[in-house]
Image (cartoon, rainbow, N blue to C red):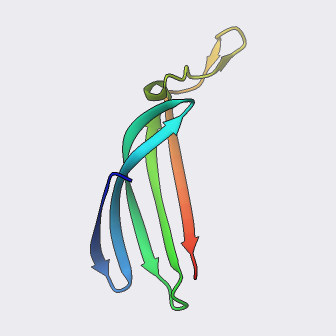
Amino acid sequence: MKSSKVSHFKGETFLVSAAGNLTIAGVTKLVTLKVNCTVNADKSITCSGTQKLKLTDFDITPPSFMLGAMKTGNDVVLDFSLIYTK
């Protein structure tokens, strides 16, 4: 991780902005994730967020099939959810 910033949102919920290197298919890019984190009653922490990426930013050609007649888009959405416990 290169940097992070934690801001209190409300109650037991915090907003985290974390910047770090993401490597896909051997290509590394600096990515900043916006993460929602909640401290639960059992003291575990639930973190979740969404990040949009472009395949071409990682030198990946968007897939196609049927000799190129059908193509996918360049955009990929990464949804993540993590639960931290002691």
Q: Residue at x 70, y 8 (%)?
A: 67
Which residue is situated farthest in the bottom direction here? 41
Q: Nearer the viewer, residue 21 or 77?
A: 21
The residue at the point 65 percent across, 11 percent down is 69
Seen from this angle, which residue lies furthest front? 2
Q: Quadrant of residue 85?
A: bottom right
Is 77 above or below relative to 9? above
Residue 45: where, in percent of width, then height? 50, 78
Q: Nearer the viewer, residue 67 or 33?
A: 33
Estimate the x, y position of residue 28 in percent, counting from the top left.
45, 34
From this view, report whether residue 62 is shown above or below residue 35.
Answer: above
Rendered view: 53 above or below 37: above
Q: Image quadrant of residue 72?
A: top right
Examine the rendered structure and indicate whether residue 31 appears above or below residue 13.
Answer: above
Q: Where is residue 75? Give x, y as percent.
A: 48, 33
Q: Nearer the viewer, residue 79 or 42?
A: 42
Q: What is the x, y in percent for residue 54?
A: 45, 32
Relative side of 25 to 28, left or right: right
Q: Quadrant of the C terminus?
A: bottom right
Q: In this orientation, which residue lies closer to the viewer: 1 or 10?
A: 1
